Image: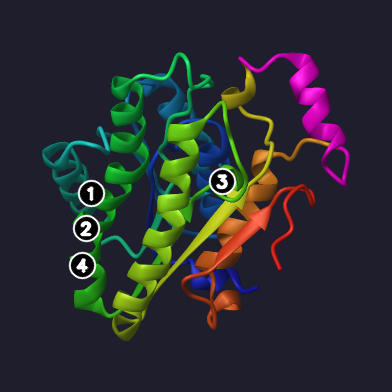
């Protein structure tokens, strides 16, 4: 896999301040890309991500935006363009998760989850794709989840949003392929990030026991999959969802 695929390229990573997003920023910065680290509220974490990217010898910037707000996203893209140039690659990683059973789920919970995870995906992609179409080059990776592939009674809204993301990936891939824009997705399993901080240890242990590899994944392992899908090593792939779950979910 050639790192030359990323040299001179600008990549925007939404939700890039920590966890999988930070790992993606570091992996792509290490490959030579110019990295725009998007964040919503955690400015200090985003600055630390950018500092770590710069320590690798790559150019980086932080850019605040609410991905669910069209005006905010338009301003974000304009700032990235001004500082780093047109956006060649996009990692749609921003998302929220609330562990809630059906008895406590509300319409507001549903709307909030769909607005960020799915509507935000649409807004950011639509803000970036015109410049990709103009230059006849674009690489997009959407961060889904294995929650999209198996029943999740304690995360109904989240599972629905991530399943929608897979359908969005397939349809946009088909729509944009003639413009040399490839769109793929990653469906991680249990990963060592803040998203599992509120999950009790017995549940974590049960999930690990259900995982053939008998462990939790790391953000770096997901970042490696993202790197692959953005690179030309995956040049014959579009509209695909790669599962990285330690074998916990195996697709036919």
Disc nearest the viewer among 3 and 4: 3
N-term-proximal mark, 3 vs 2:
2
- Label 3 packing within 10 angstroms: few (<14), some (14-19), many (20+): many
Q: Are marks 3 and 2 in contact (CB under 8 Å)?
A: no
Task: Determine which residue is flagged by label 2.
Answer: 126
For residue 225, above or below residue 162: below
Task: Determine which residue is flagged by label 3.
Answer: 145
* Residue 56 can be seen in this image: no
N-term-proximal mark, 1 vs 4:
1
Marks 3 and 4, how far apart in space? 28 Å
Marks 1 and 3, how far apart in space? 20 Å
Task: Determine which residue is flagged by label 1.
Answer: 123
Tell me where residue 137 appears, x and y as whole percent: 33, 76
Q: Which residues are magenta?
A: 198-214
- Label 1 packing within 10 angstroms: few (<14), some (14-19), many (20+): some
Tell me where residue 212 appears, x and y as whole percent: 87, 47
For residue 28, above or below residue 239: above
The image's mark for residue 131 is 4
């Amino acid at each position: 896999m050639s790192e030359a695929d990323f040299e001179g390229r600008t990549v925007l990573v939404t939700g890039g301040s920590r966890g999988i997003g930070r790992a993606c920023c570091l992996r792509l910065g290490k490959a030579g890309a110019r990295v725009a680290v998007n964040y919503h509220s955690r400015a200090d974490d985003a600055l630390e991500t950018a500092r770590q990217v710069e320590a690798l010898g790559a150019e980086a910037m932080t850019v605040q935006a609410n991905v669910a707000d069209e005006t905010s996203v338009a301003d974000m893209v304009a700032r990235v363009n001004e500082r780093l140039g047109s956006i060649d690659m996009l990692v749609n990683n921003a998302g929220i998760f609330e562990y809630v059973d059906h008895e406590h789920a509300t319409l507001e919970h549903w709307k909030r989850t769909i607005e960020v995870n799915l509507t935000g995906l649409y807004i950011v992609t639509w803000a970036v794709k015109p410049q990709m179409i103009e230059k006849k080059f674009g690489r997009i990776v959407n961060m889904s989840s294995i929650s999209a592939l198996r029943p999740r009674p304690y995360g109904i809204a989240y599972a629905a949003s991530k399943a929608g993301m897979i359908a969005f990936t397939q349809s946009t891939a088909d729509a944009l392929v003639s413009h040399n824009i490839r769109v793929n997705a990653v469906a991680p399993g249990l990963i060592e990030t803040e998203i599992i901080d509120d999950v009790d240890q017995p549940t974590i242990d049960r999930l690990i026991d259900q995982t053939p590899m008998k462990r939790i994944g790391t953000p770096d392992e997901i970042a490696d999959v993202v790197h692959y899908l953005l690179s030309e090593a995956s040049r014959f792939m579009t509209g695909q969802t790669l599962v990285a779950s330690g074998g916990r979910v195996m697709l036919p």
